[in-house]
Each structure stands twice: as structure tokens, then as C-alpha cells.
Amino acid sequence: MTSTLHGAGVSPGLRSGAVATMPPPVPEPTRTTLGPGTAADDAAASITEAVHAVQADLSARAARATGTAVEVLTMTAAMAADPTLLKEAARKVREELTVPARAVWEAADDLARRLESLGGVMAERADDVRDVRERIVAALTGQQPPGVPDLEQPFVLVAADLAPADTATLDPARVLAIVTSGGGPTSHTAILARSLGIPAVVAVRGALDLVDGEVVLVDGREGTVERTPSAEAVARAQSGSHVERSFDGRGRTADGVRVQLLANVADPAAAAAAVAAGAEGVGLFRTEFCFLGRTDEPGVAEQVTAYRAVLAAFPGRKVVVRTLDAGADKPLPYVTADDEPNPALGVRGLRTAVRHPGVLGRQLDAIARASAAEDAEVWVMAPMVATPDEARDFAAACRERGLATSGVMIEVPAAALQSRWVLAQVDFASIGTNDLTQYAMAADREAADLAALSTPWQPAVLSLVGSACAGGAEHGRPVGVCGEAASDPSLAPVLVGLGVTSLSMAPRALGDVAAVLAATSSDLCTELAQIAVASPTAAAARAAVRARLPVLEELGL
């Protein structure tokens, strides 16, 4: 008999297939001590060797990956080499004579608990620490490391949640859909599923009751998982596979109002994918790939080479370069502190420049040199800006280096509400809807229990977007969106109606967003924005907008 499980739909699409569950985790090693004649120093050295092997494996995966996956894998590789973890595990071996596998397990457990005690975004890293722990223990004991099942037939992947290293290497040709009991709409799983075009539903109650081989129907738009679906439903899913639409490189509404459709990129490979998808430029160039996975700051020359590789792909087109967004879920030993009580509300983004002004200064020097060497139209923006004074100082630092177009990320509600003053200081703004939603709703974006809150469809969040755009309009400043909200074809007209002038997204989403905008007049966009903001809930806003956009059903969206 058919039954339906409900969760948060985070990546649209309708797929049916047999379930494959994630294999059990690496078991906890027993608490034993080194045997007679075993040298503690040699045992401690084996931990270092295992760590290097795990880090090399993750780095190799990062080299084969593209887009957001590169950043996620590189960050996980850096966590594998965390000196705190390695030092504590080695101490346990040398001083307590604990066997290496058990020493790593205990040291990682201690670190994970400390992260969880911090709460917020840092607590999200605890699962990553445990994933790295299992990989190191597997390397030490000769076991298979955790990972996605390797099956001949395509399958629906079911798990409590997916580690970033696993999610980043999913093969869309083999994984039909993803169902997890944990996670939220802006978790790593959700973001990477969208970038890969894999339908996904997270925060599903009862997901772990699904068994291997069971056939399910996953609706990534509605957030449902249907057990024992009918033959007709399975056939509908198989015949309705989404066709990736092309984009002609010019975003506009039905009545010709221009809306720039740009791509988010994190490395040169992602830039190539954006060019192939027809992106008008880059709305978010994440520069963290230069800084993650290392214990010291990259030199200016190294940064110049890395930035030029991306800028060279977009001659004559806009590339918005975001300066280093360190802190919170991207800690860096040479920039961020490891003892902040609440890192999500702490020293992150532009705030790190207060104690480490040289890091920002050298990065701006590198961006300026790369810009002078290439033909791209370079815009530069700072993350985590909250006040007009911060915007003013950043703009001044850019002008000193000949970077003519400076802007800010609007991720903090205060910046959205005070945008008239913030945007008096800079040339543009880009709204990061993931953090804006997290801060506006006081909802950890990784928490499954808060998934219903963690959506940009929240009327309060949309009101903040409207406030930011109004402040931009007052000074004639463009305001874009570069958060995950820009990838939602049904939300795109609402954002345009609120005053957003550009949308930056995963390259895969460009065709769908362009098609919906091309079928929607600017007047209807304005009307839809008013309807959404006036709605009492996120679900009501989404339902009301979709009811006025029949093109979504026509396009299978």
C-alpha cells in the first residue's frame, strides 16, 4: 500500500528507483594499549601517514571535481590535517600508549564535542570531523572508508546525511535522487545536489525506515518520497526526466526588461562550465579555493595566477570577485580564532581584516594585478558587511589599488534595512540569501528540525530583499542575488519584482531561470513580489506564486 514521507524539497525533479542505503559507519575501535615491543613514536608516525593518505585522497577528489565541490573537498582535506586533531592523537599514543586507531577516534570525538558546544555554524563542522575520523581510522586499520555505494544500476541514495566529501563526488548518471533524514535547504547536500541536477529531499521523517531494493518515487520540488508507487507514477517519473535547457546568453523578462543571468564559480574548471552554459558573466567568484587546505596564506603571485585563470574565461564580461570569506564554517588557522563562543556571529568575512588587515590588502593587490592583466570587467565585493562605515573603508581600500567598482554582500539583516546608507558608500550590492535567511529566521541552515524555516520564500526574508533593493534604487546602484535563491525558477520572477537586477546561480540552473523570466512580464513580476511579501507563511507565498505562473507546469518545473 502506498504511503508518503515528507521533508524539504531542495533540488527539483521527479525520479523513481530502487533504494540504496549508505553503508554502516566505520566501527569504533576498542580501547586497547600498545603491545610489548611496539615503539610509541612509530605508532604515532603511523597516524601522520594515515592523515597524509586521507588528505591526499580528498585533494585528488578535489582536483577531479568542479564548482562548489572543489571548495567542499578542499575544506574537508584541510580538516583531515587539522594540527589540533593530529597533535592530540599523537599525544595519546606517546603518553597513554593508546593504539593509533583508538587515539584518533578519541581525539576526534573530543574535537567534535567542542565544536558542538560552540553551536551555530561551527557545530555543523562536527559531522565533518567525524567523517574525517572514520577515513583516518579506516586507513589505519585497512578497512573500506565511508562512501556512496558502488552499484551497477542507478539508485536512490538514502542516508542520515551525507558528508561533504561524499556529496561532492556523486555521479548524476548513477544517483537518481537523494533522500536524507538530516540536513536543511542550504546544507552542503542541498547545495551540491542542486549544482549536479540531482533531485533531493532532506529532513525526511522516516527516511531511515527505507530499505535496500525498495522502489520509491522522489519529488524534489514538493519534498515527498512515495513508497511502493504505482506503475503509472513510476512511468510518469521515467518519462518526465528533466531536459537541461539552453540559455542564449541574454536574460530578460517577456517585455524585454534586462536581468543579467550570471554564474557562481569557485575555480577555473567551474568558470569553464559557466562559459559552456552561456552565463553572461560571474556574479560570485569564491576565492576561498586559494586559501583552504593550507596552514599559511598564499602569496600575492600565487593568487594572481589563480584569479587570472578565471578572469581569462570572461573577456569583456563582468566578474564579481568576493574577497576571502573566512570564519564560521571556513576556519583558517592564519586568520580566524578557534575559541569563539559563536563563530556564526563572530569574526568572519570582512571582519577578519580588523586583526589581519594585511591578508585583505594583499588579496586586493592580487585582484588588481590579475584585473590589469586580463580583459574581464572586474567588480570586487566584501562579505559580511553590516554597517556603512565598513562599506566606506572597503571601497577606499579598493580605490587605493585602482579597483574602480566595489560592492558589498548583504547577508546581515541590518545591512538590508540600512541599505540606503550602505549603498551610498559603494557601487553595488549582492544579496547572499543563504546567510540572510539564517540570520533573519535564527535558524541553523544545517538543522533538519528547522528546515521549514530555512527557505528564502519566507516573507520576512523577501521583505529584507525588497529593502535592500529600495536602498540601491535610491542611489541608482544595482542589487543582485547570488545565494541559492537565484537558482529557483519559481522564485526568480519574485526577486526581479522586488528590484533585483541580476541573478547568479549554478550554471545548470541558467536555462530554467531564463525560460521562466522570458515568459513573465515585468508587471507580473512586481505583482508576484507583492503577493509573496504579503503572504503569511513561506508555504503560502510559494503556493500563491506558483498558481500565477502556469509556465512552470508547462516547462515541467
Image (cartoon, grey):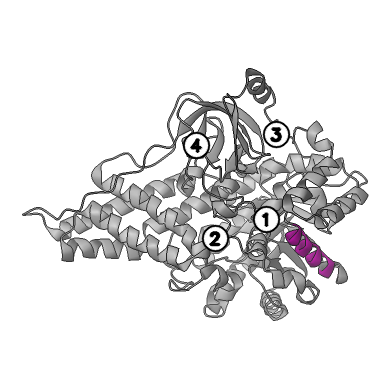
SS state under label 1? loop
Q: Nearer the viewer, mark 1 or mark 4?
A: 4
Name which residue lies at 63% across and 69% down.
384
Name which residue lies at 48% across and 45% down.
161
Q: Which sits earlier in the primary sequence, circle 3 or circle 2? A: 3
C-alpha span from label 2 to label 4: 30 Å
Q: Nearer the viewer, mark 1 or mark 3?
A: 1
> In the rendering, which numbered label is found on residue 244?
3
Q: Amino acid at mark 2?
A: Glu
Q: What is the magenta range?
A: 459-471
Task: Report if residue 500 is visible in the image.
Answer: yes
Q: Which sits earlier in the primary sequence, circle 1 or circle 4? A: 4
Q: Amino acid at mark 4?
A: Val
Q: Amino acid at mark 1?
A: Gly
- Kindly report the secondary structure that dominates the magenta region of the rendered protein: helix
Is the residue under label 4 in contact with that under label 2 (CB below 8 Å)? no
Q: Nearer the viewer, mark 3 or mark 2?
A: 3
> In the rendering, which numbered label is found on residue 288?
2
* Left/right of residue 410 with respect to residue 2 in the rendered view: right
